[in-house]
Image: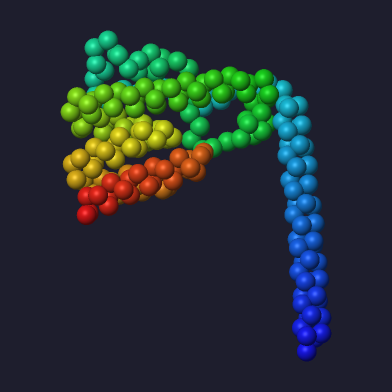
Amino acid sequence: MWLQITAVFFVLLFWAIFFVAIQSARMRRKQMKMTQRFLHDEDEANSVRKQPLDPELFFTADFKELPPLPEGDPHKVERAAKRKMIRFTEPISNVELKKRYGRLQLEYLAHYEENFNDYLRCLTKWAEALIKEENPADALRILHHAIALGSEFRNTYKFAADVYADAKDTQGLEELLSKVVFHTFRDPATANHIIAYIQEKVTAISA
């Protein structure tokens, strides 16, 4: 009896080891193919000559949807808006950018995108100041504008959630949550953090 059990155990162990070995070999081959593909794409992208940037890439700030700028522009919104900015409506890899515009344009693209992000930061700081000044309506106008532009800063959403929570506006929180869920964040951890924050606000109101 024990010999049969032992024999069965070793047979199962053998097949388990064999299965793991097969799966590991498949994973290594898959990883190798992915690496080779990446290196091929990288080499191909690096060989592309410098191409002019599409005019539609560039973003121009529109203040029509925003409250009047405060005197002296303490949050430097206008200064940020005057810089050359690029807004990517969908996440795009550096390899794809180099394929489209050439390796030499990558640094400029990164700089122009950072200018756009700085503009969103300034908008968020302005909204924060308005919340402290007890002007939540104008703060929400600014935050909604930044969210519509694709802001990925946590505070943009958290400040909006705070305003809705203070007003006990469950519908506003749910609509904000929906925007976060359907937005493609580059960092999933950021999305998860914002979602958890908004859900906490909803729970607190419902309690």
Residue that sits furthest to the top in the current view? 72
Front position in the image: 5 or 52: 5
In this picture, residue 121 sits left or right of residue 91: left
Relative vertical location of residue 205 with respect to residue 91 in this rendering, above or below: below
Please state the total of marks drawn on the protein image: 0
Residue at x 68%, y 25% (from the top left corner): 102
Q: State the image coordinates of residue 151 (x, y, percent, origin top left).
A: 41, 33
Front position in the image: 117 or 188: 188
In this picture, residue 100 sits left or right of residue 131: right
Could one spot residue 57 in this view of the protein? yes
Q: State the image coordinates of residue 48 (x, y, percent, origin top left).
A: 72, 26
Residue at x 48%, y 42% (from the top left corner): 189
Q: State the image coordinates of residue 26 (x, y, percent, origin top left).
A: 77, 57
In this picture, residue 197 sits left or right of residue 168: right
Residue at x 76%, y 69% (from the top left corner): 16
Residue at x 18%, y 28% (from the top left corner): 134
Which image quadrant is residue 73 in?
top left
Q: State the image coordinates of residue 118 (x, y, percent, origin top left).
A: 43, 22
Could one spot residue 151 in this view of the protein? no
Which scheme is used to colour this image of the protein? rainbow
Q: Where, quadrant-wise, is the N terminus in this rendering?
A: bottom right
Residue that sits furthest to the bottom in the current view? 1
Q: Where, quadrant-wise, is the C terminus in this rendering?
A: bottom left
Front position in the image: 173 or 63: 173
Relative vertical location of residue 86 with respect to residue 8 in this rendering, above or below: above
Residue that sits furthest to the front in the current view? 2
